[in-house]
Amino acid sequence: MLTDQNDEYKYSGLMSIYFREKSERFERAMDSILKQEILPLEFILVEDGPLTQSLYKSVDKIKKLFELHNINFIIVRNETNQGLGKALNNGMKKSNCNLIARFDSDDINRPDRMSKTLARFKSNQNLVLIGSNILEFDPNNSDFAQYRRVPIGKENIAKKISSRNPFNHMTVTFKKDAVEDVGGYKDVPYFEDYYLWFRLLKKGYNVDNIDETLVDACVDSDFYTRRSGIQYLFKEINFQTLIFKKRYISFFKYLYNLIVRGGSRLIPHDAMKYVYLVIRRHENTFN
């Protein structure tokens, strides 16, 4: 494993975890971080509200493993569940590096994720955020595998963002000063990351994706349940209204998104998986 980085390219790992996470998936995700070709200088874990006893045991175990690798392991504890945006903002405040890599608590990071990401930052120092494609897998169904490709190049990302989220959040690494410059993550439930991308682009920052799959993302039945139903519909409407009022999208796109994106939230949970498969194929075809 490579650890000799220039100070400018040392990075902090950042993750938020809450009580619904399964300890075995969390440990598998953390193991994939320890297998990176370039390890983080430090790792910041935000416990977003009280965890289960099983998760607390896993956190203690992982903390010791990271420290054996000379990685400073910082735990930030929120007394109550504050949501992803606030949790990540709390974690960012503890970072001693300007480069921050986002990690999810149930995904598997391929060993070359960070080495390829850091190489891209070195080749283009104007970039403030870099993501990649993902492979979605279902831990309960070995036959399921679906790629989610993202647009490449700032111009293409800016063109696609009004219709779809142009980054896979669990793959991004960003510069802390740029994210703080636009106000960090905002409390927009389920759309904290998407709203952040809009603001970075609006401010003129350079962003990009690597056209490779660097993360395997865990997608099970809970994933589809969380993205459907009346509550998610209201959050979708709230987000679309917000970006319309900010003039990030046109009135036509606003209506289109309410009908197409909003309408899909009312599809029964059991059918949502198949709708997502169709959406993924469409996105990948017209990337």
Image (spheres, rainbow, N blue to C red):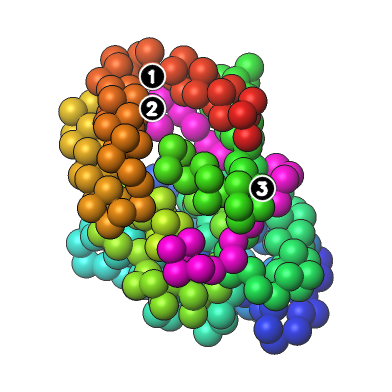
Tag 3 secondary structure: loop
Tag 1 secondary structure: helix
Mark 3 and mark 1 residues within 8 Å of each other at the beta carbon = no
Q: Which mark is residue 152?
A: 3
**Span highlighted in magenta in the image:** 200-227
Q: First in sequence: mark 2 or mark 3?
A: 3
Residue carrying label 1: 272
Q: First in sequence: mark 1 or mark 2?
A: 2
Report how far apart the C-alphas of labels 2 and 3 lie in the structure: 26 Å
Residue shown at 46% from the left, 28% from the top: 220
Residue shown at 63% from the left, 34% from the top: 287
* Along the line of sight, the residue nearer the viewer: 34 or 54: 34
Which class describes the residues within 10 Å of circle 2: few (<14), some (14-19), or many (20+)? many
The amino acid pointed to by label 3 is Ile
Q: Quadrant of residue 116?
A: bottom right
The amino acid pointed to by label 1 is Met
Residue shown at 50% from the left, 24% from the top: 279
* Along the line of sight, the residue nearer the viewer: 12 or 20: 12
Say above or below: 111 vs 134: below
Mark 1 and mark 2 residues within 8 Å of each other at the beta carbon = yes
Q: How many marks?
A: 3
* Along the line of sight, the residue nearer the viewer: 143 or 153: 153
